[in-house]
Amino acid sequence: QVQLVESGGGLVQAGGSLRLSCAASGRMFSIYAMGWFRQVPGKEREFVATITWSAGTTTYADSVKGRFTISRDIAKNTLYLQMNKLKPEDTAVYYCAARDTRSNAYDAWGQGTQVTVSS
């Protein structure tokens, strides 16, 4: 099993930037990919960005392309999400997740970190 702990959320004005971090521990050798997802109360959790752990191949939701950048530091077992040009609609709880090589789903989740963008 993999344990995930997010940090870096907070309050920022529209147009500003934040960087989220996700510290991972446990069965790191079995991770295929990691990602960021977000959720607003009353709505389903949505995909933001993913990265394959070994190759570093990235995918992004259309709503964040060109503004957010996902990256990882393999030596530090840490996932990042650099968020620039933030918009009020980016306000959500952001979750870090990991997908095992033996799984087709993201099945390890962090506790989430709140990001609030004021207009």
Image (spheres, rainbow, N blue to C red):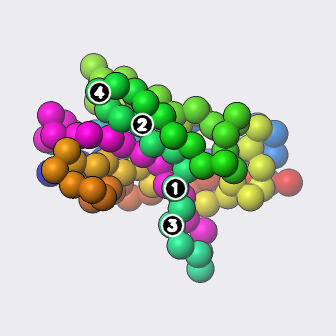
Residue found 23% across the figure and 40% down from its top: 31
Q: Which residues are magenta?
A: 27-40
Q: Which residue is mark 1?
A: 47
- Nearer the observer: mark 3 or 2; the answer is 2
- Name the residue tied to disc 4: 54
Task: State the separation of the CA atoms marked 3 and 4.
Answer: 25 Å
What amino acid does circle 1 point to? Phe
The answer to which of marks 3 and 2 sits earlier in the sequence is 3
Q: Mark 3 or 4 closer to N-term?
A: 3
User: Which of the two marks, 3 or 4, is nearer to us in this view?
Assistant: 4
Please give the name of the residue rendered at 81% of the width and 39% of the height, measured from the top-left corner: 15
Q: Which residue is labeled 2 in the image?
A: 51
Q: CA distance from mark 2 to mark 4?
A: 9 Å
Discs 3, 2 touching: Cβ within 8 Å: no
Give the amino acid at mark 2.
Ile
Q: Is residue 2 above or below residue 92?
A: above
Magenta stretch: residue 41 in it? no
Q: Residue furthest bottom?
A: 42
The C terminus sits in image quarter = bottom right
